[in-house]
Amino acid sequence: MTAPEPRKAPVLRVRDLVKEYGEGDAKVRALRGVNLDVERGDYVAIMGASGSGKSTLMNILGCLDIPTSGTYLIDGADVGRLNEHQLAILRNRRVGFVFQSFNLIPRMSALANVELPLVYGGIGQAERRERAMAALEQVGLTDRVHHEPNQLSGGQQQRVALARALAHQPALLLADEPTGNLDTASTGDVLQILDRLSESGRTIVLITHEDDVSAHAKRVIRLVDGEIVEDRRQAPVDGAPPRMALT
Ligand code: ADP
Ligand code: MG
């Protein structure tokens, strides 16, 4: 594997990223040359109207899709130069992904869902259990670990998905509209968890089209038609209170 750069390397370095779908008249340029660095510990909200390329960018950064051209490094590793095996390891260990629709596996307990990436990561049973429990504790769900997704509220399901993304202690947490399917109270719970993760130094890139959500980030990037048109820092709204009262 490419030797990781010293710890000072940004978690993300994106250069001239282009993504086109289709060909000829049907060609869609979803990303038109995106440049972006994200430093360790940053909390970035990527905003933009529907169709502006947010999910396309996220899927490429999460190694779920490949760009048409351009390069990007995650934690110092040049993703375009990795073979399938290295890519699988990167995807599994260094990036945690949270989707709008939770994407939990039905008829599997919350605990088993959180353990799954650790199974793929080849981690032994005892340690797996310990890490998954710790991740579920981080999201305030220790009393729901044996519940299956359909026995949990939307907000609780998203917190399980967050725990699953965190179980590997990823260098980067990517979240594509994580509160898009949630009511106000559950949105607050998820944002509170993200605030706390950010305060503890985790690097977060979140996609949203809601100002209430992006207000929690330290930096806001706006995409229009596949291009970054704005990139600004802001003082995030007040962080999480010292104790959570999640239900
Ligand atoms: P957003 O997440 O900001 O709503 P997307 O990244 O999903 O935007 O889409 C950006 C553009 O790329 C849109 O015009 C969309 O229609 C197009 N697009 C996305 N995925 C595909 C695909 N698999 N095939 C063809 N076009 C696509
Ligand atoms: Mg989208």
Image (spheres, rainbow, N blue to C red):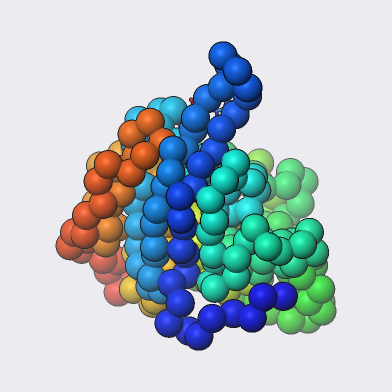
- Percent position of residue 166, x then y: 57, 67
Quadrant in the picture for residue 39: bottom left
Q: Nearer the viewer, residue 38 or 113?
A: 38
- Percent position of residue 216, x then y: 28, 56
Quadrant in the picture for residue 2: bottom right
Q: Nearer the viewer, residue 15 or 220?
A: 15
Q: Residue at x 50, y 56 (%)?
A: 174
115 horizontally vs 53: left or right: right
80 horizontally vs 105: left or right: left
So how many labels did they put on this image? 0
- Percent position of residue 72, x then y: 53, 59
- Percent position of residue 68, x then y: 60, 41
Determine if residue 174 is in view: yes
Q: Residue at x 74, y 81 (%)?
A: 127
Is residue 2 depicted above or below 73 in this figure? below
Q: Quadrant of the C terminus?
A: bottom left
173 horizontally vs 44: left or right: right
Determine if residue 206 is in view: no
Is residue 171 depicted above or below 127 in this figure? above
Q: Nearer the viewer, residue 59 or 183?
A: 59
Q: Quadrant of the N terminus?
A: bottom right
